[in-house]
Image (cartoon, grey):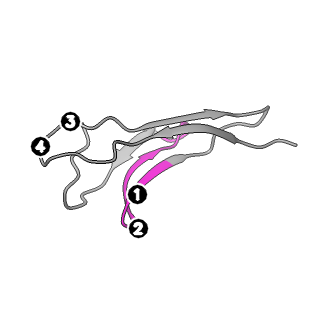
Amino acid sequence: CLCLKLVRVGVPQYKLRGELAVLECHYELEGDSLYAVKWYKENEEFYRYVPKSNPPQSSYRVDGIKVD
């Protein structure tokens, strides 16, 4: 099967406003190619990585989120 295997997602449980938070998504492609990785806060997309797009990274305004 060509599929993506999610290995681990790392998201801090709590952060104070203004504190840095690092979000991690570890996966194995298992022979397939990556189409996209997307991050959401309360059903609103705030970050997208699509390797075949130019540019591959996009971020969107969502209250309480600052992508650096």
Horizontal side of 62 relative to 7 (left or right) equals: left
- Residue at coordinates 20% horizontally, 61% vertically from top-left? 63
Residue 9 in the image, given as x and y percentages of width and height: 51, 40
Asked if residue 50 is among those painted magenta in the image, a careful observer would answer yes
Give me the C-alpha separation between circle 3 and circle 1.
17 Å
Judged from the image, the secondary structure of the residue bearing numbered disc 4 is loop
What residue does disc 2 label? Answer: 43
The kind of residue tagged 3 is: Leu
The circle on residue 40 is: 1
- Bin the neighbour count of mark 2 within 10 Å (Cα to Cα): few under 14, some 14-19, many 20 and up: few
Judged from the image, the secondary structure of the residue bearing numbered disc 3 is loop
Q: Which residues are magenta?
A: 38-53
The kind of residue tagged 2 is: Asn
Give me the C-alpha separation between circle 2 and circle 1.
6 Å
What residue does disc 3 label? Answer: 20
- Residue at coordinates 62% horizontally, 45% vertically from top-left? 35
What residue does disc 4 label? Answer: 18
Q: Are the two marked residues, 4 and 3, in contact with CB atoms closer than 8 angstroms?
A: no
The kind of residue tagged 1 is: Tyr
Residue furthest right as drawn: 1
* In front: label 3 or label 1: 3
